Image (tube, helix red, strand yellow):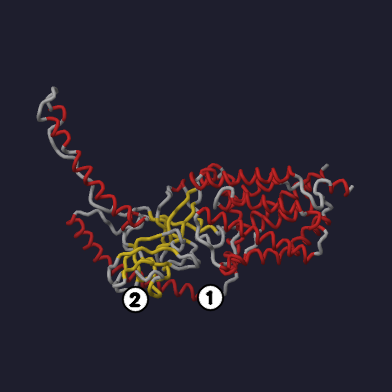
Amino acid sequence: MPLAREESSPLFAGTAAGTLRLIFYLALAMVLMVLDHRNGWLWRLRYATAIVVEPVYRLASLPADGFHALSVAFADRRLLTEQNQRLREDLLLANAKLNRMAAVAEQNQRLKELLDTQHSLELHVQMARVVGVDMGAYRHRLMINLGARDGIKSGQPVIDARGVVGQIVDVLPNSATVMLVTDPDHAVPVMIQRTGLRTIAYGSRNGQQLTLPNVPMAADVQAGDKLLTSGLGGRFPQGFPVGEITNVGPSASGMFLEAHAQPSADIDRADEVLVLHDLPEPAGPPPPIAPAGPPASDAPAPASTVAPPRATLPAVPASAARPAATPPAGAPST
Amino acid sequence: MSRQRLSFWWFVGTLVIALMLMLVPLPHVLEAFKPYWPALVLLYWALESGDQRVTLGLAFIFGLCSDLLTGVLLGEQALRLCVLAFIALRFRSRLRFFPMWQQTLAVLALLVNDRFLLLVVRAFAGESTPPALWWASPFVSAALWPFLFLLLDDLRMRLRLQ
């Protein structure tokens, strides 16, 4: 009986059919990978199969949730009292600050109205819970329990109480994936709070840090400087804390200074995050106003010598203004 | 008949549990040391029941399922698991009669090879190279292999399944 079974897997020589089959499957996998990389098939497929995929995520997050619940249930009474005390103090402090800020905010609002800008200090946020699912080591992704049904869209910024966490990259019906600011593929346009210098903070390859690889040599940057979002690029609203610079040194090329920063958000330990709903004002000058003139119906129907130049004139400033308007919006995202 | 069906469900169940274990998060410190569970369970079944159960097609479908769950790149794990299953099936008759320590070394070699494949795929996809600790996972997986093998084998014997 065992001898008969050995026929299928001989000791030394393999069969050509097996190798052919391997080549077929490898080719299939490669085709799938290329198509997915080009067109993002995977997420469409995931969206279609969300009814199967999402319960699996919920099931896989159960151990982490259970552990969290257990740690709360068996927590020391002293520990809880301490935590409670700390939270009360934080609340008191925050309320005191808010009260002091209220008058300033009101004044700011009035002045802004005078200046006729639409920027407001109010936040439109949605609270989301982090689903405890492993998205792969060194993947710099989080999964949250809000999705397309809650009005989440790709590109929305995600913050926590201390700063920017990242942005939404992929949306399923009931959950969404957040790309963290520490991802090597992620970039945030930032501003150094002390000096107002604008630069870009990238995620770093090794670990939980941010890198600012192109700070000008002459710039005044020190360890301890706070980074805020600059609002350029049209993704993150202005003025949210991003991180704190830990060290500055010359970059490998010697042309720039390279700074490293610690993200201010509690990225490893975040349980709850906020998804921002208001996007910043679009960067760049406002779109050109359509030139006022006599309505086209008033123009004489037969072609005259005056009408053609008047009809072509408005097209020239509009096309000239567009290239000027696009670079500020596109530049920081690259 | 019902025993056959039971052993089929036991087979499917272990594969599903492997996918689940892949998704369950570990504490942040241990994250890099996480074993690649789907590969280990697939290897066990490839060695245990050969191409009666584990074929390249099954490895491919299983890989696609785990791709769908991890959401990295469709086809990535399908490719890796196909290669793994192919090598395991090709050398099955020898691997099965190895003493446990040799088998563990063979599993380590297979998993390191798998990591190389992953590195190549990631490089083509334009991702940055991972840090050195990323290579720890095959060693942890190989260290767990004897225990996993004995556990699954023991359970299979106790339940009198094929």
The residue that appears at 63% across and 46% down in the rendered structure is A26
Q: Position of residue A255 (x, y in %)?
A: 35, 69
Whether residue A141 is visible here, answered yes or no, is no
The residue that appears at 51% across and 46% down in the rendered structure is A43
Circle number at residue A222: 2
Q: Position of residue B100 (x, y in %)?
A: 79, 64
Residue placed under numbered mark 1 in the picture: A79
Q: CA distance from mark 2 to mark 1?
A: 37 Å
| Above or below A304: residue A161 | below
The residue that appears at 45% across and 60% down in the rendered structure is A273
In what element is the residue under mark 1? helix
The chain letter under disc 2 is A
Q: Position of residue B160 (x, y in %)?
A: 84, 52
In this rendering, do the residues under marks 2 and 1 share a single chain?
yes
Q: Is residue B8 left or right of residue A194?
A: right
Neighbours of disc 1 within 10 Å: few (<14), some (14-19), many (20+):
few
- Most extreme residue toward the right is A1
Q: Position of residue A274 (x, y in %)?
A: 42, 58
Label 1 is placed on what type of residue? Leu
Viewer-proximal residue, A64 or A6?
A: A6
Label 2 is placed on what type of residue? Gln
Q: Is residue A36 left or right of residue A260?
A: right
Which one is in front in this view, the residue at disc 2 or the one at disc 1? 2
Q: Quadrant of the N terminus of chain B?
A: top right
